[in-house]
Amino acid sequence: MPDGIFYFLTNSQLLTLVAVLEFSAAAAIWFLHQIRLEAKLFIVAWLAALFSIYRLGLIMSGDPTPCKCFGDLFGWIGLPDHIIKGLSAGMLLYLLVPSLAWIWLRRKIGAPTDITVSPKHLI
């Protein structure tokens, strides 16, 4: 079934494209040790902003179906559409709000912007 915004792509093509985008962002955050913490937060915020714009486009187009960001996972489980919409909106806010808040807070308190975080520091 075609998407409400990307009508020229099938759902599987769109999910594949989004998966490549998500994995690219995750790889940049995980493997690029030399980029600053603020840049990593920006990558997460940028990705969440793209998802927000997509969801806003779905709402504005009047598409009644929930976002297909989970594929058919919740359809298989049998969750109603309003629960799926709430879960996807919650996950979007989980990505967007903390990353923007950390960027804002770091700039407000004048935290050094040259801090790098690598996976070695997380273990």
Image: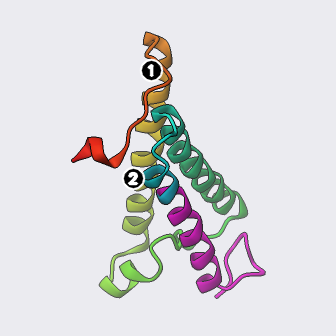
Tell me whether the residue at label 1 lies in contact with that at label 2, contact meaning CB atoms closer than 8 angstroms.
no
Q: Which amino acid does label 2 sit on?
A: Gly
In magenta segment, residue 59: no
**Range of residues picked out in magenta:** 1-26
Name the magenta segment's main secondary structure.
helix
Position of 108 relative to 64 (above/below)? above
Residue 94 in the image: x percent, y percent? 39, 47
Instruction: Give the side of residue 64 with respect to residue 87, left or right.
Output: right
Residue 98 against residue 93 in the figure, above or below: above
How many tags in the picture? 2
In the structure shown, which secondary structural element does the residue marked by tag 2 occupy? Answer: helix
**Residue pointed to by mark 2:** 90
Under circle 1, the secondary element is helix
Residue 5, position as x, y percentages in the image: 72, 69
User: Relative to 34, does residue 75 appear above or below in the rendering?
Assistant: below
The numbered disc on residue 85 is none
Q: Which residue is drawn at 59% across and 64% down?
A: 21
Dot 1 alpha-carbon crowd within 10 angstroms: few under 14, some 14 to 19, many 20 or more: some
Q: Residue 78, image x and y in percent? A: 33, 83
Q: Say which residue appears at 40% left-offset and 68% top-offset.
A: 84
| Residue drawn at (72%, 82%) of the image | 9
Q: How far across and down, in percent of the image, does residue 74 sit?
A: 37, 78
Dot 2 alpha-carbon crowd within 10 angstroms: few under 14, some 14 to 19, many 20 or more: few
> Which tag is nearer the camera, tag 1 or tag 2?
1
**Which residue was labeled with disc 1?**
106
In the image, 119 versus 75, the foreground residue is: 119
What amino acid type should be assigned to the residue bearing mark 1? Answer: Arg
- In the displayed orientation, state which residue is furthest to the top: 109
**Closer to the N terminus: mark 1 or mark 2?**
2
* Residue 24 among magenta residues: yes
Q: In this view, does 51 lie above or below 75?
A: above
Query: Residues under labels 1 and 2: Cα distance?
Result: 24 Å
